[in-house]
Amino acid sequence: MKPTFMKSALGKTRLLPLLMGTVASFAGTAHAAAPGITSTNGTAATFLLTAQPAFLNQPDGSSVYSWGYGCVTGSSPAFVPAGMHDASCNTMQVPGPTMVVTEGQTVTVTLTNNLPNAAGNTSILFPGFQVTTTGGVTGLLTQEAAPAGSVTYSFKASTPGTHSYYSGTQGDLQVEMGMYGALIVLPANVPAACNSGLHASNVNVEVAHGESDFRLAAAAFDHDKSCYDREYLFQFSEMDSNIHTQALAQVTARSGCTAGAAGCSLEVPTEPYHPSYFMINGRSMPDDMDANYEVEYSHQPYNGNPHMHPGEQVLLRIIGQGRWQHPFHEHANHVRILARDGNMILSATSGEDLAGAPLFTTTTTPGQTMDGIFYFTGRGLNWDMYGHNPKSTDPLANTTCVPDSNGYYTTNSAPPAPVAAVNYFEWCQDHNKPLEVNPVGDVAGGGPATLPNPLIFTNGAWYGGSPYLGPNSNLLPSNTQGNPSNERGFAFMWHSHNEREITTNNVFPGGMMMMMLIDSREFVIDEAN
Ligand SMILES: [Cu+2]
């Protein structure tokens, strides 16, 4: 975002959306993962989906009539990753259930149409796969399920990576109403390299600090340059509530009509298009920061609340599900694109090296998916990022930082960093580099930044723009860097760079915005909710 925008944001919200700021209290305990449903039928993966109406919550208090895919009542999918709290699959949700399968599996999805009769037929497209169909009625793009009817789609999960699925019937209306979701195909053969050396050490360090592994796999593809330590799925979409209001009015006026009879249909104009809600995984900011499967979002189960530790390789699974492009900016670093639509982008000459662009904004083309790696280490900040230094009174401070050949303190250092080191993957050049003089900072020497006098509140009590001050700083009021207890991190705003899209029904802040929290190692990132 632009500096001018940051300034105004500070005045309006407690979120402190800073380029470099201290973590605020909004994060609570809700973290994220890439939750979904899976099928345990061996070589076959079977899913029973239904298409139904329900109302979606928006943070301005409105309930928006929508359509979505969900799990048939009585079908009992397994939930992944293991250990998610309160995992469920409602009969209608937006986005639809994230189906997680393994490369090579035969995937069979039976869709039953429980939309109002006036909505007519519906269907699912699985772009990128060779789909065969059973039953249903002939539609323009695929076989469709008539009202109360069913259709079955079957295909081999031939390409690993992140894929989209969405309605192939009257897409201008049905996709707008919420009929889209994700299909994640895990690689059949995770490269051995992902389970050893530096690749494995990040996960070992997490374990040493009491963290669980919430990955769906250790690699995104059958390729040793696609290893990752953590993953998040983000589906971007927008809604024009006028379309939804019209759909509800017409469905209500025609309730009880006979499917297929004259007049039992909708005439909902989808142009001109003026979206009022801009969503990440079906939720607008700040709702996207609440937990996965939170009870007040029974039809919007997935959140957007990424966390990581410095040095981790974070896999971003990104899908454009609306009809607009959204220039989504992941602050703090570019996203190295691994694949588009499940197709890895490799060097034409070596055939092995990654050739995907590092993107400043991951532009979400409608229907397209991207797999990318986000990475942040704190290299070059010019101060000791978390105050892990000998002069700190923090009992977790570490006096050691031995650079490996890349300058970081890792298992490649000599002697190697212990997996329990609180400053694992620290950029050693900045180790013990003080920021400010006591009592403002928690270090005892002159540093690269001049901090405001805490006794002068010209900048307001919510001073922002400073580097992280270490766990013992007394500069900020409570509920900022001291809380949640033990959380020590940097908040980077991840948001649409079309600033119209970080509003909710024209009110800032809202919409397509979340925070990436880069936490110090001793903060346990619990992705269970
Ligand atoms: Cu930005």
Image: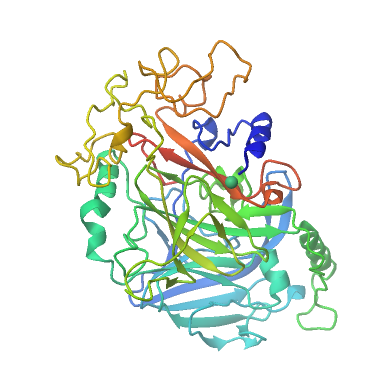
Say left or right for 243 vs 393. Answer: right
Q: In which quarter of the image is residue 208?
A: top left
**In the foreground, 437 or 189:** 437
Q: Position of residue 187 (x, y in %)?
A: 34, 70
Residue 300 in the image: above or below residue 168: above
Residue 203 in the image: above or below residue 252: above
Q: Quadrant of residue 280?
A: bottom right
Residue sitting at the far left: 415
Say left or right for 187 vs 514. Answer: left
The residue depicted at 24 percent of the width and 35 percent of the height is 421
Q: Position of residue 113 (x, y in %)?
A: 64, 75
Its colouring scheme is: rainbow
Q: In which quarter of the image is residue 445?
A: top left
**In the foreground, 456 or 505:** 456
**In the foreground, 236 or 121:** 236
The residue depicted at 53 percent of the width and 82 percent of the height is 152
Total labels drawn? 0
Residue sitting at the far top: 455
Q: Where is residue 39 in the image (x, y as percent from the top left)?
A: 40, 69
The residue depicted at 63 percent of the width and 58 percent of the height is 326
Q: Position of residue 194 (x, y in %)?
A: 26, 60
Say left or right for 192 vs 75. Answer: left
The residue depicted at 51 percent of the width and 41 percent of the height is 492
Q: Can residue 299 be seen in this view?
A: no
Q: Is residue 393 visible?
A: yes
